[in-house]
Amino acid sequence: MNASKVVENLKQRFPNEPEYIQAVSQVLVTIEEEYNKHPEFDKANLIERLCIPDRVIEFRVSWVDDKGNVQTNMGYRIQHNNVIGPYKGGLRFHRSVNLGILKFLAFEQTFKNSLTTLPMGGAKGGSDFSPRGKSDAEVMRFCQAFMSELYRHIGPDVDVPAGDIGVGGREIGYLFGQYKKLTHEWSGILTGKGLEYGGSLIRPEATGYGNVYFLCEMLKTRNIDIKGKTILVSGSGNVAQYTTEKCIQLGAKVVTLSDSDGYIYDPNGITSEKLAFVMELKNIERGRIKEYADKFGVKYVSGARPWGEKADIALPSATQNEINGDAAKTLVANGIFAVSEGANMPSTPEAIKIFQNAKILYAPGKAANAGGVSVSGLEMSQNSERLSWSSAQVDKMLHEDIMMNIHENCVKYGTESDGYINYVKGANVAGFMKVAKAMMAQGIV
């Protein structure tokens, strides 16, 4: 395989999907050496088959707003690869959603799910509908209209969606209710459900907690303790909230949070009480992070991200490409020695090169934020067994059986001759090899 040629070919075939091309390019460059050790892969044209999704489902979603006006959005489901298990990946409701973004996310999800050690394939879906500013009734009607088409393409042993940006407990509930009505059956068709109807303890916390567990494993390789360290967190949604919570529990000081309007900087650190305010603000009142600055009298910077503030560790937990080359240079110059991604592909290729050239600890999202989908997999297992596991049991499995295992595989495949651990290469090769071997075993299908 020549990675550059494969990427150029994909650019010509899919010219308007930059995020997808970026994700594929990042993976292919790191697996090229390992791939070329297996000539049987090339004979089976495995790389092209792996890059292009099994199927792309697009549909119209029509719904009625509170004023009685009919609105129309696009709905998508990208079923990328299911050689390891049923398609698995979140649904994103946000105005930025398009085919290229979802293809990149589904591609990444395939390798992330492979890393978890659980039997899950890769998928992603969503809509350019944004719940922001909509009433509960409008969100419900949209979710019901969305599921009225999606239900034909999913099932507990086919494809099991979950939440993502814009899809939290409220949306999952409405989607689940409509699926149940349409199919006349109760099944574990969605993860991230409420505890009252088949959800798993620790699921809301899993992505944030898992990222911090992975970070701690990285820090151990340099005999560094997270306690007392100052941390920049971006975002203020689910991932950022529980990343902050776990950091507080472990004795670290989180000084920033953000949303699409700007960021707050609290030099004294976000305490458990202040975090409770953020959770109420974001999860119930659906307000803006500026209200934190107004309430606690701290700095707020409009239209910016928090990467210019001084700290020890950065945990990007908002969205893709939020750290560019300039931001990465600033982070390194300010003494950041570890970056662990809670979001999906939040660092641009230029930023990643800067982190790696500086030899700082850098963990890509497919490894560091795999805790969310891992506990989704555990939720599927609980649904299949018709059992509910304790929070201690789920948290122990997340920490010791999954995140530590992922870290171990990254070290195995990513340790370079000078001892530096290239977590990008380690995660990509480890995830790829499992998928590749399964594809070879199952023939040309």
Image (cartoon, rainbow, N blue to C red):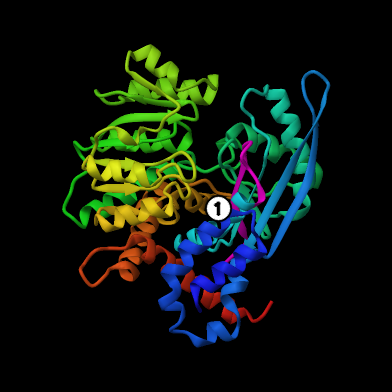
Percent coordinates x, y for residue 102 in the rendering: 61, 51
Query: Where, by quadrant of the figure, is residue 445 drawn?
Result: bottom right
Q: Residues within 10 Å of mark 1 (few under 14, many from 20)?
A: some
What residue appears at the point 75 percent right and 48 percent down from the top-left corner?
150
What residue appears at the point 50 percent right and 77 percent down from the top-left corner?
2
In the rendered view, does 153 fall on the left or right side of 320?
Answer: right
Q: Which residues are magenta?
A: 84-99
| Amino acid beneath label 1 | Glu
Percent coordinates x, y for residue 242 in the rendering: 40, 36
Q: Is residue 46 visible?
A: yes
In the rendered view, does 14 fall on the left or right side of 301?
Answer: right
In the displayed structure, 205 sits above or below 40; it is: above
Percent coordinates x, y for residue 159 in the rendering: 66, 56
Residue 445 among magenta residues: no
Q: Secondary structure at mark 1?
A: helix
Q: Is residue 114 visible?
A: no
Query: Where, by quadrant of the figure, is residue 209 drawn?
Result: top left
Of residue 41 and residue 19, the one placed in the foreground of this image is: 19
In the displayed structure, 327 sits above or below 8; it is: above
Of residue 97 and residue 63, the one placed in the foreground of this image is: 97
Residue 94 among magenta residues: yes
What residue appears at the point 25 percent right and 53 percent down from the top-left corner?
360
Q: Residue furthest toward the left?
A: 223
| Count of numbered marks | 1
In the rendered view, does 224 fall on the left or right side of 250?
Answer: left
Query: Where, by quadrant of the figure, is residue 88 drawn?
Result: bottom right
What residue appears at the point 68 percent right and 49 percent down from the top-left corner?
187
Q: Which residue is mark 1?
A: 19
Percent coordinates x, y for residue 185 in the rendering: 75, 47
